[in-house]
Image (tube, helix red, strand yellow):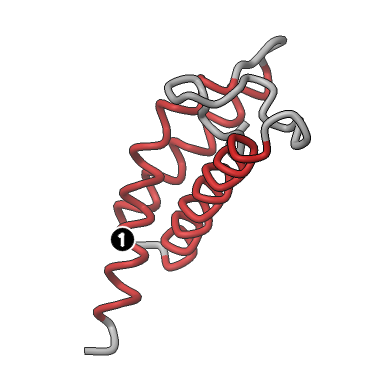
Amino acid sequence: MWLRPRTEGIQVSVAWWRWNEHPLESAEAIALGLLNLCYILAALGAAVRKPPLAMFMTTYILLRCLLLATLENPKPRYTLEAFPMVFVLGAVFLARHSFAKT
């Protein structure tokens, strides 16, 4: 659910994985999924470094994942509430990584 591209708000077919039917839309959906992966990897990088704020945000995200694992029919939109924290954690990782050398 974390890597699923959010195609509801853009002009991409719901069946974006059918490459032969609409290759441009499928490429756009895959690019959005890869962008989600980059956000999550940056957030994991911040969680590994363990600044105090990252510890609390990581705990919330993990608890949210545990809650979604207990639901009988979880939907991808349930992960959207945790994405602002993923963005902040990614920014923490990028800020520490890029300014550490200066």
Residue at the left extreme, as displayed: 102
Tag 1 secondary structure: helix
Give the quadrant of the N terminus.
top right
Instruction: Please tell me how crowded label 1 is: few (under 14), some (14-19), or many (20+) other residues with Cα within 10 Å.
Output: many
Q: Which residue corresponds to the image point at 49% horizontal and 20% vertical from the top-left?
A: 8
Q: Nearer the viewer, residue 30 or 73?
A: 30
User: Which three-letter amino acid code belongs to the residue tagged 1?
Assistant: Val
49 with respect to 21 (left or right): left
Number of marks in picture: 1
Q: Is residue 64 above or below residue 84?
A: above
Mark 1 lies on residue: 92
84 with respect to 70 (left or right): left
Whole-percent x, y for residue 66 in the image: 61, 29
Whole-percent x, y for residue 74 in the image: 64, 16
Q: Which residue corresponds to the image point at 69% horizontal and 10% vertical from the top-left?
A: 73
Q: Nearer the viewer, residue 30 or 87?
A: 30
Q: Which residue corresponds to the image point at 67% horizontal and 32% vertical from the top-left?
A: 22
Residue at the top extreme, as displayed: 72
Q: Is residue 49 above or below residue 1?
A: below
Q: Nearer the viewer, residue 35 or 56?
A: 35
Whole-percent x, y for residue 5 in the image: 56, 34
Give the quadrant of the C terminus.
bottom left
Q: Which residue corresponds to the image point at 36% horizontal and 64% vertical from the top-left?
A: 93
Whole-percent x, y for residue 49 in the image: 43, 68
Q: Nearer the viewer, residue 78 or 21?
A: 21
Q: Is residue 10 above or below residue 3?
A: above
